[in-house]
Amino acid sequence: MTRAQFPDRPIDGWSRLTAAVPNFISRILFAETTSACRVDPGDLFQIGCRLKDLAPTTEKFWDGWRTAWRDLAEELLAGIDDGSPPAIQRRILRRAAAANHWGQFLFFSDLAAKRQDRYHIRQLWEESLRSLERPAPVEVVPPDSAGWGHILLHPASRPPWPWTVLFNGLDSSSEVEAVTVAERIVQHGVAVLIPDFPGSGLGLADRPRPADLLSRLEEQAPVWKSDPRLHRWAFGYAGISFGGTIALGLGLRGAGDPAAVLNYSGGAAVPPTVRLPRRLSLEFATVFDVESDALDDRLSEFDLSRQWSNLKVPTLSLVGQFDDIFPAADLLAADAQSDHHRTIVVPSEGHMFLNSLDRHLNLGAAWLASALRSKLPPEGEP
């Protein structure tokens, strides 16, 4: 910023940001992490100062939102030089990647630009991993020609590991929230596979989610299980937000014979689009590549509400009392219909219980690890 661009008086970036997106700040800060991408609180203040339009109901706001975050990312990266210690380089790379993530999050007016952002986020994150003195317990398998790849985080113990597939939220880059959640699970000795597939992760802007997505994922389960380092019995599904709905759906199908399912704030069905905030409705329509008036039919695949009597897998759902996307009541109904489903309602919290997130991420991770370890053979047996 040149001297001529300095404001005449201090700008209160926090007040401006909370005026524009009051419920979004906890989401952006999410949770502490050692290997995922995350911005600093001061970055949020800077974004608040840079925003010109404070009305998130307009495309103009989201265009300016993306520009502000991208500019911040470029300024951060410009601060790296050959003399920067590796630890500082890693932190800057991850802050810049996270800034790019939040810039493209809920930005749908230019999918080619969104695709470019997604690949840039992955590039910066992988670069941060390469700067480690010792190899990180993280492996990245880039998407194949059909759009299927994954990130694998694993514990330091010898394989085979108990493990879970972790499905991310609808419009989230894997390198931010999913890797943060995966860390909590890995700390309990469980490996985590975060898939890229059409409409998710790197595949989000490349191609839409396929019709009959649950069947496509069910077909992929034997491919994931073919890795000899992943235990053939101690295997489960987990998911964040809409990824939790996917995990529940695969658990109901018994896809790959899972030992447990963990759901962080996913629902038993996607509410009718008339009940969704406009931006969220647009998010679903973009990810599934359908017009808004056809969205309810497209999402009927994920109405699990009449299937709970088929559930045979131990399943834990954590949901905020005031979740306005996936209501707690729908999951409590599953408890009444299946002895295998248990719901923990987090008091006074909304979607993803962001104000007590760390505690409940750890609670879910501990439960999943215990359920998977119960499938391991006694010590010394193959």
Image: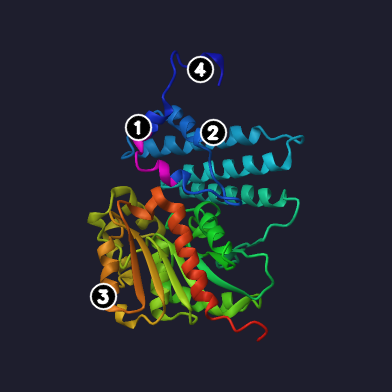
Q: Say which of 331 and 348 sits in front.
A: 348
**How far apart in space, not on screen, are marks 4 and 2 (Cα)?**
15 Å
Instruction: Please give left or right for residue 185 compared with residue 278 in the image.
Output: right
Label located before the other in sequence (3 or 1): 1
| Mark 3 element type | helix
Mark in front: 2 vs 3: 3
Amino acid on which the number 2 mark rests in the picture: Asp
Farthest front residue?
Answer: 379
Provide the residue designation for mark 4: 5
Which residues are the magenta region?
A: 18-27
Label located before the other in sequence (2 or 3): 2
- Residue at left 36%, top 78%? 340
Question: How far from the left and from the top, in percent, is residue 321?
Answer: 29, 56
Provide the residue designation for mark 1: 54
Amino acid on which the number 3 mark rests in the picture: Ala
Residue 336, label in figure:
3
**How far apart in space, not on screen, are marks 2 and 3 (Cα)?**
50 Å
Label located before the other in sequence (4 or 2): 4
| Mark 2 element type | helix
Provide the residue designation for mark 2: 71
Residue 24 lies in the magenta stretch:
yes
- Residue 7 sits above or below residue 296 on the image: above
Residue 57 lies in the magenta stretch:
no
Question: How far from the left and from the top, in percent, is residue 237?
Answer: 47, 71
**Where does the C terminus fall, quadrant-wise?**
bottom right
**Where does the N terminus fall, quadrant-wise?**
top right
Label located before the other in sequence (3 or 4): 4
